[in-house]
Image: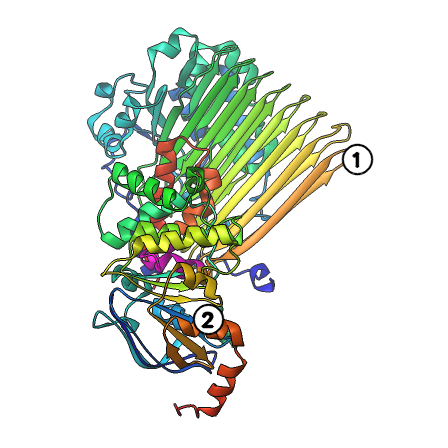
């Protein structure tokens, strides 16, 4: 739903990575963030999700009016936030199915009936064109890059967040896998669901059409526009936006 | 890891920490003592004679006991393993006969206060479920022992060790003390001198007891010792699964458990022995268990050590004839003030024998888990194969683990592999799970559960659930 990032400054190991990010994703909208590697895109979404290695130096992230930066990561998840990781983590010995049930219970605070769970799972697997045997595998263990990304979307479909932060979910996917993932994300579309997608490629945005595109350079949003911005970026590369960023004096902390 | 080598395990645990542990241990309650015989404290010839007399044993057994007493006295307390300096062997009651009503075959015949204990532990209830037979030991004696009729009809014997000695004297004498002689080690010797209680199991040729037999051990009195003796004979082509569970009240002074378990797995037979050891944190648990495995037979140990103050326990498998196989799965969890010194031993005597040891340990707070294992392959055990894998998980900065893998290979054609890993709870894993809505405690618990899954999945479902539940209990308050 409604996410407002206000003057967000974030550091890691005493190095400032985000330098005053302002961004508004209203309910029902999909926004994209693009930008060169190492400029703070992952830092932004991980800080919003509550990754412990980051220090919030200043600013607020209001989700439906609540400053989520004051909450534990699990509380943020219960508020409806979901992060599809750029590098999903392997959890040996825990099956996808078992984990999904526990996660749904944790998020809703209720026991889930096995039949309800199973129905929902079957539907999600169908959307993702995925075989049921996957859910008996250990979470992300031995998954290929593409399988891990697909598993992030499976979890999203099962957990039904109201806001998805997607970090390069399309990287490393072939075109068929990309279509499947896009189908999963589009299946979530509603007036009560929004998303912020980090990507390098316009081709993702052809399948999941964004309401706005933002460009992040050196820890700031240096340019925002409609979906044509992604096309422009792909044609011209990142050099022009980097030059533009260099000419905009950074705000002092 | 120089820190891990540094000796810093000690008995000086703050009282407050003990009080806290005892509070969280759910089986720490006790019943008033109302006993038929309570031998005086300490170990003496008189105590040994008293035990023998009370059991109305044949003369050879008294001789065996007295010889074992001498062996016990001649052996020093072992110094190579866990710290046993806190164990005062003279401050222990070596024999407590709780009641004259021994080996009841119905729970109605078990004295009320004792029955209440086992009711609270859920034993009669679990007996109605998926078990072929149940035994229950209280202090030094088996108060209950029952085998379902369908198995009795097939010739399966499941009795208290005393009844086994009385009712099947030849079978008993042929095997008793052959797998683990009193000379084996100091604690096998003390057990041989004062043994009391335990099970006698015989499964006839080709009979497969598909559902487990279970025995439950309970210590109730303070400063008491329990020295059960179990003898299991699986005849050719037969199968059985034996499960033992144990608990005790939490006292501020120590108790002592030193069992001896001897198993004979004959040609083509298969035996699985599972333990879920959950003694209170004031018990020294020093157990000797060993299986002699014959041609093409298969022995599996599943050993879960969660409770006790100090455990020294290394289930052993002797692969005596060709194509014998042995597997040892060991799980240990050590939290505040605990030292689990566990692992396994496999000795390959014959060609084409194979074995594997998988050990998973979890150390929490200042708990210490050690893997201690031996793989020995004698000259002539051609093509023997063995694989050892030990993984340690450390939950806190002051948690400790160490590995003592002894490998002795005399045979050139043998192939032996060893792999060891040490890991910490990884912050990225915790964050990943929390970002899905799991609390930090639930996330950590799930990672631990996943860590032991390869072993838990080998247990019957109810026991896997129980194991996970016990680990979760120990995990409580582990974060923050
Ligand atoms: N865990 C970390 N420790 C140290 N530096 C980090 C860590 N994570 C990110 N950084 C640094 O922060 C900067 C931004 O990284 P990141 O947010 O991952 O960029 P992007 O996602 O845009 O490629 C980079 O310079 C990176 O090296
Ligand atoms: Mg990134």
* Quadrant of the rendered image containing residue B434: bottom left
**Number of other residues with Cα within 10 Å of mark 1, as a class: few under 14, some 14 to 19, many 20 or more:** some
Residue B17 shows up from this direction: yes
Q: Name the residue at 35% across, 38% down.
A: B465
Q: Name the residue at 43% across, 29% down.
A: B228
Say whether residue B134 is magenta.
no
Q: Which mark is residue B371?
A: none
- Residue B287 point in image, percent of width and height: 49, 36
Q: Are marks 2 and 1 on the same chain?
A: no
Majority secondary structure in the magenta region = helix
Q: Which mark is residue B412?
A: 1
- Residue B439 point in image, percent of width and height: 31, 58
**Number of other residues with Cα within 10 Å of mark 2, as a class: few under 14, some 14 to 19, many 20 or more:** some
- Which residue range is magenta in the image? B429-445
On screen, B373 above or below A106? above
On screen, A252 above or below A191? below
Q: Which residue in the rendered view is the most extreme toward the right?
A: B412
Say whether residue B442 is magenta.
yes
**Is A137 in front, or is A210?**
A210
Q: Secondary structure at mark 1?
A: loop
Q: Name the residue at 76% across, 28% down.
A: B382
Cα distance in 3D space between marks 2 and 1: 67 Å
């Amino acid at each position: 739903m409604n996410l407002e990032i206000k003057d967000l400054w974030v550091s890691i190991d005493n190095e400032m990575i985000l330098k005053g990010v302002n961004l508004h994703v209203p309910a029902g909208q999909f926004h994209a963030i693009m930008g060169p590697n190492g400029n703070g895109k992952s830092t932004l979404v991980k800080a919003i999700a509550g990754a412990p290695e980051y220090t919030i130096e200043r600013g607020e992230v209001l989700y439906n009016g609540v400053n989520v930066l004051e909450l534990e990561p699990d509380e943020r998840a219960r508020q409806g936030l979901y992060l599809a990781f750029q590098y999903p983590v392997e959890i040996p010995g825990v099956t996808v199915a078992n984990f999904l049930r526990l996660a749904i219970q944790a998020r809703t605070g209720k026991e889930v009936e096995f039949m309800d769970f199973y129905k929902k799972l079957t539907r999600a697997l169908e959307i993702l064109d995925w075989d049921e045997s996957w859910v008996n595998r250990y979470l992300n263990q031995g998954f290929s890059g593409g399988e891990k990304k697909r598993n992030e979307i499976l979890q999203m479909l099962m957990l039904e967040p109201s806001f998805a932060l997607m970090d390069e979910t399309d990287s490393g996917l072939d075109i068929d896998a990309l279509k499947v993932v896009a189908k999963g994300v589009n299946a979530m579309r509603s007036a009560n669901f929004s998303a912020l997608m980090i990507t390098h490629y316009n081709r993702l945005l052809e399948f999941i059409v964004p309401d706005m595109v933002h460009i992040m350079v050196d820890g700031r949003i240096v340019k925002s526009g409609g979906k044509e911005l992604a096309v422009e970026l792909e044609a011209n590369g990142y050099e022009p936006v980097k030059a533009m960023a260099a000419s905009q004096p950074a705000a002092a902390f | 890891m120089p820190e891990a080598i540094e000796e810093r395990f000690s008995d000086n645990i703050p009282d407050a920490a003990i009080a806290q542990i005892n509070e969280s241990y759910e089986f720490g309650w006790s019943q008033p003592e109302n006993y038929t015989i309570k031998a005086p404290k300490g170990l003496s010839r008189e105590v040994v004679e008293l035990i023998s007399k009370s059991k109305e044993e044949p003369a050879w057994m008294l001789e065996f006991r007295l010889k074992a007493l001498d062996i016990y006295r001649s052996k020093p307390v072992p110094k190579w393993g866990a710290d046993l300096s806190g164990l005062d062997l003279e401050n222990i009651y070596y024999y407590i006969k709780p009641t004259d009503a021994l080996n009841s075959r119905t729970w109605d015949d078990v004295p009320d206060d004792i029955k209440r204990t086992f009711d609270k532990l859920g034993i009669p209830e679990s007996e109605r479920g998926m078990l072929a037979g149940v035994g229950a030991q209280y202090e030094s004696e088996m108060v209950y022992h029952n085998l379902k009729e369908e198995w009795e009809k097939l010739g399966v014997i499941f009795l208290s060790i005393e009844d086994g000695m009385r009712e099947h004297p030849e079978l008993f004498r042929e095997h008793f003390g052959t797998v683990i002689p009193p000379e084996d080690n100091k604690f096998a010797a003390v057990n041989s001198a004062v043994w009391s209680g335990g099970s006698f199991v015989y499964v006839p040729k080709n009979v497969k007891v598909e559902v487990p037999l279970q025995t439950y051990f309970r210590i109730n009195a303070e400063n008491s010792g329990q020295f059960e003796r179990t003898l299991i004979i699986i005849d050719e082509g037969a199968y059985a699964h034996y499960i033992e569970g144990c608990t005790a009240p939490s006292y501020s002074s120590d108790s002592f458990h030193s069992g001896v378990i001897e198993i004979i797995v004959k040609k083509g037979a298969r035996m699985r022995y599972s333990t879920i050891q959950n003694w209170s944190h004031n018990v020294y648990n020093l157990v000797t268990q060993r299986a002699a495995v014959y041609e093409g037979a298969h022995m599996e140990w599943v050993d879960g050590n969660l409770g006790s103050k100090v455990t020294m326990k290394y289930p052993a498998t002797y692969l005596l004839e060709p194509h014998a196989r042995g597997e040892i799965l060991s799980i240990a969890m050590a939290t505040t003030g605990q030292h689990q010194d566990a692992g396994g031993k496999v000795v390959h005597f014959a060609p084409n024998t194979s074995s594997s040891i998988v050990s998973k340990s979890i150390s929490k707070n200042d708990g210490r888990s050690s893997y201690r294992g031996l793989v020995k392959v004698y000259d002539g055990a051609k093509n023997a194969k063995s694989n050892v894998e030990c993984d340690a998980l450390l939950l806190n900065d002051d948690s400790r683990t160490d590995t003592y893998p002894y490998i002795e290979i005399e045979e050139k054609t043998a192939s032996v592999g060893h792999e060891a890993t040490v890991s910490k709870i990884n912050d990225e894993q915790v964050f990943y799970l929390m970002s899905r809505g799991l609390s930090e405690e639930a996330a950590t618990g799930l990672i631990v559960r996943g860590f032991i899954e390869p072993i838990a999945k080998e247990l019957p479902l109810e026991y896997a659930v129980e194991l996970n539940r016990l680990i979760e209990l120990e995990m409580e308050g582990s974060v923050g």
